[in-house]
Image (cartoon, helix red, strand yellow):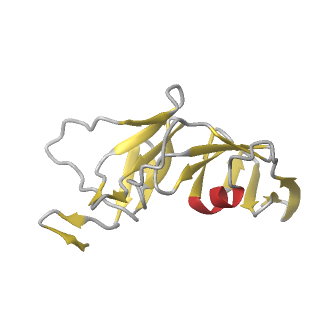
Amino acid sequence: TIIDSGNNSYLLLYCETYCIKYGINEQKVLDTVLYSKEDSSLDIVGVVSNYRPVVVKSSIYFVENIGGGIIHYNNGLFRKIDNSYAHRLQFGSSLFVYNNLIHQYGGYGFFSNRDFITYYDTTLKSWELINPLKNKEMPIGTSANFSMIKGDYFYVFNGYYIDKQDRKKNN
């Protein structure tokens, strides 16, 4: 995870039992934090390998690769903060932050690709659907795409989609 907070940029490297904070400007290790054993219900190796990191207002979160779970990382402690479950419907979704909220677009699950955006509602502690604009054209659902945010626009490039006439064919 790369964090850029003004003049201080650093890289966080998550290992099996500790996290390394590497200063990009300083070109050296700034800190090593051992993971806390306070929450023994979490498999830290599983979190580091099965979740994707995302930064919101300098706070680090991990979002489950298959959709669902969110874990907050702070001072060596991983805490599950959501009421979600591993629904397995968003493999390969685009993960992004907009208006300080975590969002996901697309993803694959149960023989189809998602064609909508969900966001993590911090009050409800679960994922909620964003209603699309009332346009005649709707994007096709994709997974394993490339995406970016620029201003108020979300761009999606490439990715896989399912042919609705031949669901066994993956394009």
Residue 34: percent from the left, percent from the top? Answer: 85, 54
Tell me the quadrant of the picture where the C terminus can be found. bottom left
Tell me the quadrant of the picture where the N terminus can be found. bottom right
| Nearer to me, 39 or 72 | 39
Q: Residue at x 31, y 53 (%)?
A: 114
Going by the picture, which residue comes out furthest to the front?
41
Going by the picture, which residue comes out furthest to the top?
123
**Label total for image:** 0
Height in image: 130 above or below 167? above
136 left or right of 89 in image: left
Residue 87: percent from the left, percent from the top? Answer: 42, 49
| Nearer to me, 155 or 79 | 79
The part of the image, by quadrant, that contains residue 88 is: bottom left
Q: Residue at x 48, y 44 (%)?
A: 85
Q: Residue at x 27, y 38 (%)?
A: 132
The part of the image, by quadrant, that contains residue 57 is: top right
111 left or right of 148 in image: left
168 left or right of 70 in image: left
The part of the image, by quadrant, that contains residue 131 is: top left
Residue 149: percent from the left, percent from the top? Answer: 45, 49
29 left or right of 7 in image: right
Height in image: 117 above or below 88? above
